[in-house]
Image (cartoon, rainbow, N blue to C red):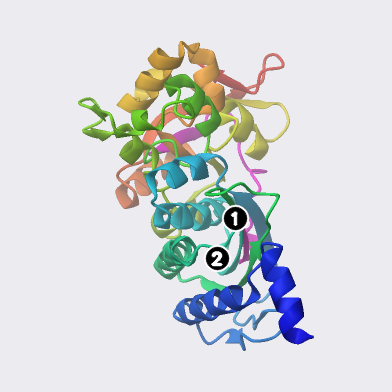
Amino acid sequence: MSRTTKKAYALAGVDISLADKIKKTIARQARTTFGPAVIGSEFFGSMFQLKGYRQPVLVSSTDGVGTKLKIASLLGKHDTVGMDIVNHCVNDILCCGARPLFFLDYIAMGKLVPEQVEAIIDGIVRACRQVGCSLVGGETAEMPGIYSEGNYDLVGFIVGVVEKKDILDGSSITPGDAILGLPSSGLHTNGYSLVRKAFGIDANPASLDRFYPELGRSLGEELLQVHRCYYPQLKRILRLIKGIAHITGGGFVGNIPRVLPEGLAARIKKRSWEIPPIFKLIQKQGRIREAEMFQVFNMGIGMTIICSSDKLAQVVSVVPEAKVIGKIVEQQNRERVLVE
């Protein structure tokens, strides 16, 4: 009966034995990220022992890589999206001042492809190691009939911690505070549906191989640049910062207001930094209005930090890449972000 059941399930498109082999490989890779706080790894739930905090506040977040996965599939390169999802989630909880503790992943595809899964996990493991985060668990799902051949979904879940007194909630932000921007490594993980349409990638995947002199690489290589992680830089200066905004989907307009107290707005000077060539290329190719570009893409600024003017010199001395790109002002109308 057991053999019959397994055969029937395999005929339905789900290979349990292959899934078990992949999970064992993942478990070996994941253990390389474990610290002493991780307790066991073979239970139905992952356990992590929290020590060394007076009033610990857990900070959690979940996100996906979005349609950047289409680019990864077309190019047959899957490790970078593994790094993307970790870095994206780490950046999100960093906005609260949190240190990453542990991470879980969810990978779903129509038919399990060991090489794809192992490449994705390799990227996740590398990114976790870089920030001292443990990959404590996850799920690999084979779902025939839901995902077409070659396509998959990748989602990440992260938990971090911050002392209650050190939470960054933006409540101390006042008019006159400086807004600094940290450069992105390209699109990060947002706006790929618009990019695919602008370049006609779905209809002509070969367009990813075209070399652009202004980029110094092919379009595909540019689009798979890893979402940058800002935790290693900013963890040293969190005490100097009043607020952090991760510039993801929604751009400046959608993300900076999330850390601003009522009655305040952000005035951004768009000429205070050099917009990378990829965004100019996208705008030209897709005939997109500049205002929409700033609503969809990070435009070369992956993270903004807000600090008082008297802390500005200290922040820049530790993070020389940080550039003043604007300031906090009193809100005059409904707009919370003014890009000038």
Per the model, the C-alpha gap separating discs 1 and 2 is: 8 Å
Name the residue type under label 2.
Pro
Residue highlighted by disc 1? 93
Residue pictured at 53% horizontal, 14% vertical: 291
| Near-viewer residue (245 or 295) | 295
Where disc 2 sits, the SS reads strand
- Characterize the local packing of mark 2: few (<14), some (14-19) or many (20 or more) Cα atoms within 10 angstroms: many
Name the residue type under label 1.
Ile
Residue pictured at 63% horizontal, 70% vertical: 15
Residue lying farthest to the right in this orientation:
1
Where disc 1 sits, the SS reads helix
The x, y position of residue 10, in whole percent, is 67, 69
Residue pictured at 27% horizontal, 34% vertical: 218
The x, y position of residue 203, in whole percent, is 47, 26
| Near-viewer residue (91 or 224) | 224
Quarter occupied by the N terminus: bottom right
Q: In which quarter of the image is residue 119?
A: bottom left
Residue highlighted by disc 2? 100
Residue 339 belongs to magenta span: no
